[in-house]
Amino acid sequence: MAFAMKWALAPFRLLFGRGVRTPTAEVLPADPDWTPPPAAEAQGTLPAEEFVLVERITRLMTLDEIERHLPDILGRALARGWIDKPFQSAFMDDPKRMLATYDVHLPDAVEIEVETEPGKRPRIVVYQISLGGRKRRLLYLQLVMMAGR
């Protein structure tokens, strides 16, 4: 019965603005000089098999994809940094390059910075760089410790 009502009212929902909205993805400008990074196997920096950030090569090319998937990936990287100090130092030095080592590729118009303040945990900030060089913050991520009872 509920399905029949939903089906019968569907045209009216679309007419009156209560229909399903499909988000439009904003494609970031492509760099014509972009070349994929050399294979990690050739560099001898292949990530450890027991830890991968993603299960397959991931290219996040739209803002919608970046906002949807990058927080999970960065969260895994931050968590790994807590237990693996060499990973943490490499990630803090160049987060975008480290993500590329683990098969997560981002457009050139996206920049990742690690902000550290004394006495606080590091915060990862993701920016979109406009053609004029202006930065717009897309998201930031910081691990928070919570105690439960």
Image (cartoon, rainbow, N blue to C red):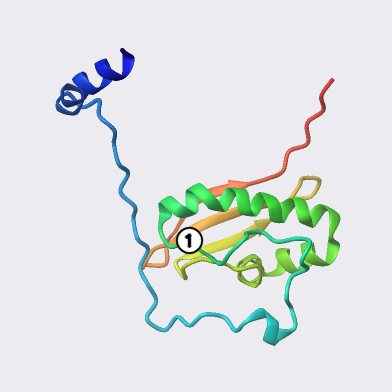
- Dot 1 falls on a residue whose secondary structure is loop
- In the picture, residue 44 is in which quadrant? bottom right
Kind of residue at badge 1: Leu
Q: Nearer the viewer, residue 68 or 46?
A: 46
Which quarter shows the C terminus?
top right
Residue 20: in sight, yes or no?
yes
Q: How many numbered markers are drawn?
A: 1
Q: Residue furthest bottom?
A: 42
Label 1 crowd bin: few (<14), some (14–19), many (20+), radius 10 Å: some
Residue 124: in sight, yes or no?
no
Q: Is residue 73 left or right of residue 85?
A: left
Residue at image point 71% right, 69% down: 93
Image coords of residue 65 (percent x, y) = 45, 53
Image coords of residue 2 (percent x, y) = 32, 14
Say above or below: 126 vs 38: above
Image coords of residue 51 (percent x, y) = 75, 60
Q: Nearer the viewer, residue 8 or 18?
A: 8
Image coords of residue 15 (percent x, y) = 14, 26
- In the picture, residue 9 is in which quadrant? top left
Residue at image point 81% right, 45% down: 119
Residue at image point 65% right, 67% down: 102
Q: Residue furthest top?
A: 1
Quickly name the residue at label 1. 60
Residue at image point 83% right, 67% down: 86
Q: Is residue 49 left or right of residue 113?
A: right
